[in-house]
Image: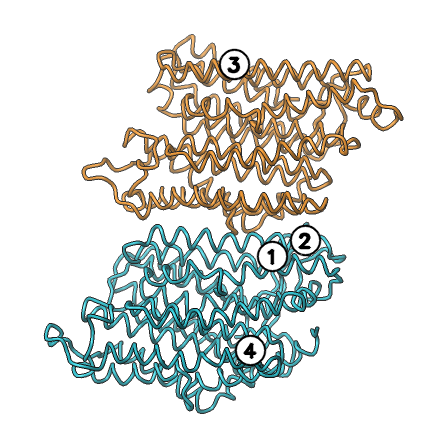
Chain colours: A orange, B cyan
Amino acid sequence: MGAIITLSLLGILLLYLGLYKAKNALLPVTLLGLLVALGFEVSEWGKEAAPVYHGMVLFDHFALSFSMLCILLTALTLFLSKAYFSAISNNVAEYYCLIVFSLTGALLVSSYHNFAMLFIGIEIMSVALYILAGIRKKDLYSNEASLKYFIMGAFSTGFLLFGITLLYGATGTFDLAGVRQYVIDTQQISPLFYGGILLLLIGLCFKVGAAPFHFWTADVYDGSPILVTIFMSTVVKVASFAGFLRLFDYVFGALNEFWTPVLLVVIVITLFVGNISAMMQTSFKRMLAYSSIAHAGYMLFAILSLGPNAASSVFVYALAYSLSSIVGFGALILVKKSQGSDQFLAFNGLGKSNPLLAAIVALAMFSLAGIPLTAGFIGKFMMFTGVMGDYHVVLLALAAINAIIGVFYYLRVIVHMYFKTAEEGAETVVMPLNFKAVFIIAAILTLAVGIYPDCLIGLF
Amino acid sequence: MDNLFILLLFPTVSAIALSFVRSAPVAKWLGLVASLVQLALTIPFVCTFIPNAEVQFEQVFPWISSLGISFHIGMDGISLPLVLLTNVLIPLIVLSSFGKEHKGSFYALVLFMQTGLLLVFTALDAFSFYVGWEIALIPIYFICALWGGPDRVRVNLKFFVYTFLGSIFMLIGIIYLYQQNPNKDFEWTSFIHLILSESEQRWIFWAFFLAFAIKIPILPFHTWQPDTYTNAPAAGAMLLAGIMLKMGVYGLIRWLIPIVPFGVSAYGSIALILCIVGIVYASIIAFQQGDAKRLIAYSSIAHVGLISAGVFAWNATGLQGAMIQMVNHGIVVVGLFYVIDIIESKTGTRLLGELGGLADRTRRLAVFFLIIIMAGIGLPLTNGFIGEFLLLKGLFEVNTWAMAIAGLTLIFGAVYMLRLFQKTMLGPLDPKYASVTDIKGYEVLVLGVIVVLIVAIGVYPNALLHLSEASVTRLVEQINF
């Protein structure tokens, strides 16, 4: 709980710092606040977990580990923000404040124990993002992104809320434990309840960007400032999956025969739509946007298989995906700054002009593609293993085909970096110190998790 | 000094060190020293190896214990010849690229690949095996795509995606076996004792077969191979043909057939037919080739077709033939690719139509080349003879017709190999090649070592055969169908 309070206060503090024009203090204060929040999370580790605040939130190991992951990813994202926000806007404080508020929402989504908190958490998380997506007021694409995100987000929130209402109508409670008890005890489950499950499933699929509810993803990721895209594709996604998994594992787990076919269809469509669209892209940014849809498909595997390993596989997968995303989008910031384009072509010759950056990006791409000794492989392996436990062999065969499509477009990045030469007179990409630090941390974590993931898997 | 883990780790450590070396002369010497040290580290294993015992030098480290994965390595008579082959060929490959100005990254990739290959040949845990299988692919992709021929990018993308396709289906097969496994681990010994229904065995057969058949390559899955070999740099082609395709054959012997014997009894004859058709098909295409490198690529399909056919015959003779012929083919094909590379660097072309009469100018090269060609054909007293003899005998024990058709490889091989020799070395010398000089220095050394190996194994094949004999016999007795 301490972390959530800290972050809420931190957001307000940041606004005041902005008011008093203390621009240089923003980043250090934010990072310090995140560190304090992280400290609170760590201190609650290992304690007996019981729902607090009248059963509103629950800080078990699941909630804590996903919260820590969110805080860590936010910190890594913000490290990249030095000189980024001030270059595109005069009102820098808003960025930090909104990101911190959004993070607060993400923490709530990973630790809710009441449907009201799920709804509030998702709203806090999303409303801040609607503004962040459109924060470049003069930019047409940024406006488009914001509007699209807002309309789609509002739409999906409607589904979510309607679903929660139906569940309440059937059970008479918002409490997760109460609803779970209803599922276990009741012989004849009300049709309202089934309707509620479906609507919640749709609402959450919107949030995680699963097809056929994915149409906002590419344009929003493309139009938003890259740093905001990083935040969206990592922290928001991780938190949404945590919320998704908690709900379906803890509450609806017993009814999986009902929703598994629906989820199976969603997964298959998501995998194919994400991968095939990503393969068609010529823009690196849009490729990553579509590939994030594909990865949402893989992460949904855990919700399909549930069981004791589901949480750890989502955790490892989300960590792997987020690290690679940070590297991919971060590299794009640098490349775009020097080459002025976010196409694949802008990466030409990077292997020669900046070997370290190219090597780290290549590692990230291999991790996304799921090559052994990277974190991405372990994530994929755990997902596949979990699904195999339920004998979805056909689904795995389809997933394998998708993995191959994935390799195809991730390798294109490597082809451009190493095997194509840059145009004459192209500026070389320089890597500022803060980028270097974040990239090296991400690369080391990717390799460490890829080589020895045992300590992470044992968290739950 | 018989710590297998160190043997696997040493190339990676030297690769990491080498990747920081930017000066080409320093890099090549360091690369050579590292690969020679690795070869020296192999000697204790060969000396203390007991052919009749089961798996030796075993090491088990808990890896991802929550999923039952351990890093389990060890060697028996099936692993050792291939480990030996890898560690003998890598120094030769490093030495053969001395004429080129490569930075440390090139040698780092070669050595990193060595770790992957050794892991494949020694892994006794399916997860470790898969990891080795995949990480061997990354360095060779970069070697071929960075230093390769004009069409390298497209061709290697195809190569990578194609091989990845095979391995991902194998991964699904492995995960399925793990779910069936009551011990919840990935151990080879648990996998081969699994009780699987026939229908399960059938699809798992294809999942594994696809991975191995693409790597070897067996007939309908070979389309990546000629382009990749042709566009690869000499060292890349040597690594691919000399060592990497043996991963596939080794996979058949170690994993596919022991795990799904019923699947093999159902589909093994199809696989056998594919192998034999591949021999004839690739040989006929090899006749027509104007590009020497492409010719060797197709000849390689024919040769490994015979090796795989011997494996699917699944008797001690055929398997022994496959074991020794894997080593022989590795040595011979490295020699062939090297000779072609030398010819290309001296004359600027490897098109047979533009070459001829080089023997006048390059006496020593011609002699070495002829001996290597003879080994490729399978002349007695060269190493190729004993391998092909055992393979054909093994096939004969299964089916006379299979043996008869596969035996055509001897005749076909003689035709295309001798044509290769004739078109390059014999006939009138084109005046524009009058200034071509003979090989010297490290070139003589590399080819000399290859020729010595060819003759030594040809005269006394038992040195290799006795390493694998007991393991092969045990495997055949244990798994029969």
Circles 4 and 3 on the same chain: no
At label 2, the amino acid type is: Tyr
User: Can marks 4 and 1 be said to lie on one chain?
Assistant: yes
Q: Three-letter amino acid code at disc 4? A: Ala
| Residues behind callouts 1 and 3 on a single chain | no
Is tag 2's residue or tag 1's residue first in the polypeptide sequence?
Answer: 2
Residue marked by disc 2:
B176
Are the residues tagged 4 and 3 within 8 Å (C-beta)?
Answer: no
Whole-percent x, y for residue A428 in the image: 25, 38
Q: Could you say which disc has been placed on residue A77 in the image?
A: none
Residue tagged by mark 1?
Answer: B207
Would you call the spot at circle 1 few (<14 residues within 10 Å), some (14-19), or many (20 or more)? Answer: many
The vertical placement of A343 against B150, above or below, is above
Residue A128 left/right relative to B160? right
Q: Amino acid at mark 3?
A: Phe
* Figure quadrant of the C terminus of chain B: bottom right
* Label 3: which secondary element: helix
Q: Mark 3, residues whose alpha carbon is within 10 Å: few (<14), some, or many (≥20)?
A: many
What crowding class fits label 2: few (fewer than 14 Cα within 10 Å), some (14-19), or many (20 or more)?
Answer: some
Q: Which residue is mark 4?
A: B402
Instruction: Please give left or right for residue B373 compared with residue B355 in the image.
Output: right
Tell me where residue A65 appears, x and y as whole percent: 63, 33
Give amino acid for label 1: Ala
Give the percent coordinates (x, y) of residue A142. Answer: 41, 17
Of A411 and A363, the residue lying toward us? A411
Helix or strand or loop: what does disc 4 sit on? helix
Total labels drawn: 4
To which chain does the residue with label 3 belong? A
Q: Quadrant of residue B426?
A: bottom left
Question: Which residue was labeled with disc 3?
Answer: A150
Report the residue at 21% width, 85% height from top.
B363
